[in-house]
Image (cartoon, rainbow, N blue to C red):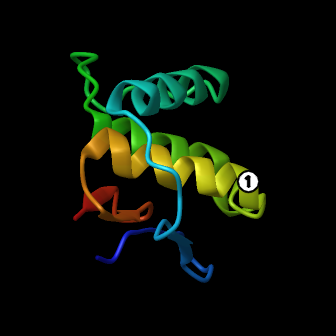
Amino acid sequence: MKSEVSVTFKDAAPVRINLEHAEPMTAEAARAWLDQQFTELECEPLRLTGKLLNADKVLLVARAVGPSGFADPEWAQQFGRCASAALGRPVVHVDVPGASVGY
């Protein structure tokens, strides 16, 4: 079964993270890593209510780190594993300019 996370940025080639042979992780561990990145990158919630969905965290972390962050293969692989596990989907597409996460 295909397992991949792709991230699209404006004026940059899409980043494709192949997870076919990646070690699975728990949703809890994935959410903890995303929470840590969200805090370290000083991301802000999208909604005025402050409610933050897992998809929001994935999108905002990708936006904050930008294409240069995905140039680090270890970080990119970890992001891919965490995005897939936190969202419970084997295929995830993060469209940063469009502010959307699709499955």
Rendered position, 100 above or below 35: below
> Residue at point 57% right, 22% down?
36
Q: Quadrant of the C terminus?
A: bottom left
Rendered position, 57 above or below 74: above
SS category of the residue bearing label 1: helix
Measured as percent of width and height from the top left, residue 71 is found at 76, 64
Q: Is residue 47 left or right of residue 5?
A: left
Q: Quadrant of the N terminus?
A: bottom left
- Nearest the viewer among 99 and 91 is 91
Q: Is residue 73 left or right of residue 43?
A: right
> Residue at point 24% right, 63% down?
102
Q: Is residue 52 left or right of residue 20?
A: left
Residue receiving disc 1 = 74
> Residue at point 33% right, 33% down?
27
Rendered position, 97 above or below 64: below
- Nearest the viewer among 39 and 99 is 39
